[in-house]
Image (cartoon, grey):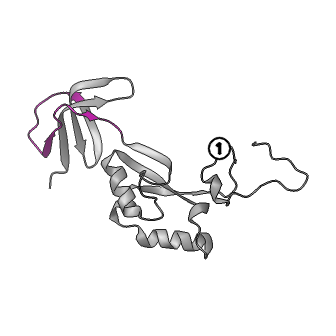
Amino acid sequence: MNNTLTIRNCQAVLPDQVVAHATVRIENGVIVKIASDAPTTDGQVLDAQGALLGPGFVDVHCHGDGMTRYFDDPETVSKNLLQQGTTTVLATLGYPDMRKDGLTGQLREFNNRAGMNTRGILGGIHLEGPYVNRKYGAQTTRGVIKNPDAPGIPCFAR
């Protein structure tokens, strides 16, 4: 079985340049060559029709896709993010989503709802709050942010 994919006629985004009319050759999931368009005769060949081809986006703090939160429906969020070019995500779960059985219950529920899309994109979990800076923290109107100050010790993050 040939495990080769060639993407032709793309604009390959590299660290120092964009290669117009590029051919990208991938063997066993690894990019082995990026060059000006060249003919290929083996493996699967895709015509990018001039589209940009670059690295996927890695999101290290993601509550959801703008319409759905990760905690509510991880599969829908993951599918939508994948379609928009996110390849790895740290799903943000935190204090606004806390269940009565706490963090353990929240993680258990998330794991139960996570399917193929989520498992394919998930790089980890980002746990948030409830100790966030009131000036910069989200969800401050919900009354769940806690004051990290011990009596007599000022908090310097104000």
Of all residues shown, which one is farthest toward the left? 41
Instruction: Note whether residue 52 is visible.
Output: yes
The image shows residue 128, relative to residue 18, as above or below, that is: below
Is 145 in the magenta?
A: no
Residue at horizontal 61%, vertical 76%? 101
Q: Could you say where residue 102 lies in the image, as x and y percent from the top left?
A: 62, 72
Quadrant of the image containing the C terminus: top right
Left or right of 114 in this view: 44: left
Q: Quadrant of residue 30?
A: top left
Instruction: Note whether residue 120 is visible.
Output: no
Q: Quadrant of residue 35?
A: top left
Residue at horizontal 41%, vertical 54%? 67
User: To which residue does mark 1 refer?
Assistant: 136
Which stretch is magenta?
A: 35-55
Q: Could you say where residue 155 lies in the image, as x and y percent from the top left?
A: 81, 47
86 or 139: which is nearer to us?
Answer: 139
Magenta segment, prevailing SS (helix, strand or loop): loop
The image shows residue 56, relative to residue 114, as above or below, that is: above
Q: Could you say where residue 29 lies in the image, as x and y percent from the top left?
A: 28, 48
